[in-house]
Image: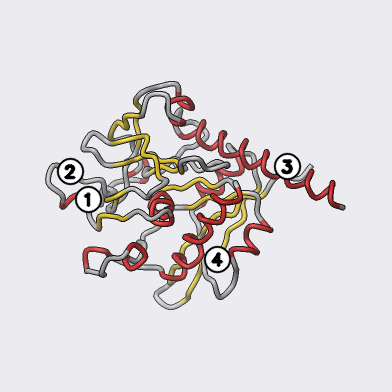
Amino acid sequence: MSRPIVGIISNSYLLNDQYPAHAGGTMNSEAVSGVSDCMPILIPADPRFVSVAELMDACDGFLLTGGRPNIHPEEYGEDYTDAHGDMDRARDAITLPLVRACVERGQPFFGICRGFQEVNVAMGGTLYPEIRDLPGRDNHRMPPDGTLEEKFELRHLVSLEEGGAFHQLFGAAQVMTNTLHGQGIKSAGSRIKVEGHAPDGTPEAIVVRDAPGFTMSVQWHPEWDAANDPVSRPLFQAFGAAVKSFAADRKEQLRQTA
């Protein structure tokens, strides 16, 4: 039997300073295939090539990945400054309406880093352009030097809301995570429930309140060593279970209407 399909949102790159490409980190595909037990498909996040309706028909769930470009602040009612960094308006045009449509339909998605921020913005929230510039906040950015293992090493605790979805999934009130982000939630969207915080108060784990499907999203990068990490593995397993359930329900609905 074929596995359900997870659309992995890709990012735009310029290879060799001149060749435009859409790409996604191999570790995202490894986590979706090996831990979620779903078939990963890379999605060119650009409305010139795909529409939200087409994506929702073709895929059973979505992985909203991290990426260097940030969400344009116009998407949450603020002016652009140099502190906001690089932008990707094409990805904004796909992911923000995709999140809202998935919430409405109950189609599963899992937001990671930029994807976590996309979920908040799609639900009406705002972002800080640079967490480390805020009084009392830590530097959450990726270390500039070192191996990948050193850059993705576990760096801080995340404290979880007692009885929340993350607490129930992990069976723990605190978990250790990596941290590789510059921006973060300023104000939570109207339906965003923040269930996890870093020691400095930065929101790290969210769900969409009263959503009928899987909406767990995290500010860290659980795709790193997802098969072995005790925090990453249950996240991708739970996501995979939700995608399989959605795919089975959709097949049954199609069978009944055939």
In the displayed orientation, state which residue is furthest to the bottom: 18
Mark 3 or mark 4: whose residue is earlier in sequence: 4
| Type of amino acid under label 2 | Arg
- Residue for badge 1: 131
**In the rendered image, the vertical position of residue 13 relative to residue 57, given as above or below:** below
Image location of residue 36, percent across then percent down = 59, 39
Label 2: how many residues lie within 10 Å, few (<14), some (14-19) or many (20+)?
A: some
Q: CA distance from mark 2 to mark 3?
A: 44 Å
Q: Is residue 68 visible?
A: yes
| Type of amino acid under label 4 | Pro
Mark 1 or mark 2: whose residue is earlier in sequence: 1
Tag shown at residue 137: 2
Q: Dot 4 lies on which element?
A: loop
- Residue for badge 3: 249
Q: Dot 1 lies on which element?
A: helix
In the displayed orientation, state which residue is furthest to the right: 258
* Nearer the camera: disc 3 or disc 4: 3
| Type of amino acid under label 3 | Asp
| Callout 1 touching callout 2 (CB < 8 Å) | yes
Q: Dot 2 lies on which element?
A: loop
Q: CA distance from mark 1 to mark 2?
A: 7 Å
